[in-house]
Amino acid sequence: MKNRRNRERIRGYKSGYGRKKEPKGARVPVCPYCGRVSVLRPAEYVYGENTIVVGSLLYVCSGYPACGAYVGVHEGTKKPKGTLADSELRNKRIRAHRAIDRIVTAGCMSRDGVYVWLSGRLNLPYEETHIGYFSDYLCEETIRECEKVMENWNGNRRGRAA
Ligand SMILES: [Zn+2]
């Protein structure tokens, strides 16, 4: 095991692992649906008059509106919040975030606790447990797992109250 790790480290070194990282946000995300490059645009480009946060930015697929994929940007940066998503996936990510919010609001787990637990349930490294990077499938799994936890949590509370 140790040898394997060492070998990987050596191979990684040769392929440039550990070299100085590119500045954050330097890479423009590519659309996973159509392969076009995305363009950083003001949120108004997509939301028009319905823009909630004026001045916020989105990476929008350059095929927009034929391809409807986009993703938000972390405030004050050019760093995408995840991968570009179509309307169906955006909706699932919102639902997954809400499912997590419910657990936190109920006082069942802390927000960080939820992500630690979720990474175990989904068999993902903790660092990769970000809804913004989740596929349709991972969002569905997240919602399902969260609902199970809430059922147990509510069931136990009812049990205690009885
Ligand atoms: Zn696209």
Image (cartoon, rainbow, N blue to C red):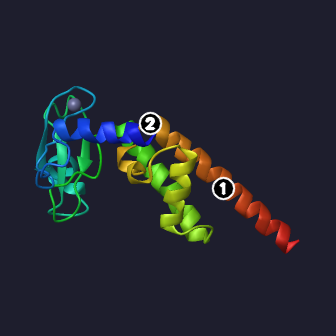
Find numbered disc 2 in the image and state the secondary structure of the residue it sits on.
helix
* Marking on residue 17: none
Evaluate whether residue 158 shows in this view. Answer: yes
The residue lying at 22 percent from left, 55 percent from top is: 73
The image quadrant where one finds the C terminus is: bottom right
Evaluate whether residue 85 shows in this view. Answer: no
The residue lying at 78 percent from left, 64 percent from top is: 156
**Above or below for 129 versus 88:** below
Instruction: Indicate the amino acid at tag 2.
Output: Asp
Estimate the x, y position of residue 42 in percent, counting from the top left. 13, 53
The residue lying at 20 percent from left, 28 percent from top is: 66
Give the CA separation, mark 1 to mark 2.
20 Å
Q: Earlier in the sequence, mark 1 or mark 2?
A: 2
| CB within 8 Å, label 1 to label 2 | no
Count how many numbered circles sit on residues in the image. 2
Find numbered disc 1 in the image and state the secondary structure of the residue it sits on.
helix
Which quarter of the figure has residue 27?
A: top left
Q: Quadrant of ligand 1?
A: top left
Estimate the x, y position of residue 36 in percent, counting from the top left. 16, 29
Q: Please name whichever residue, 44 or 31, is drawn nearer the observer in this view of the structure.
A: 31
The residue where tag 1 is placed is 149
Estimate the x, y position of residue 12 in percent, counting from the top left. 24, 39
* Marking on residue 136: 2
The residue lying at 35 percent from left, 49 percent from top is: 132
Q: Residues within 10 Å of mark 1 (few under 14, many from 20)?
A: some
Instruction: Indicate the amino acid at tag 1.
Output: Val
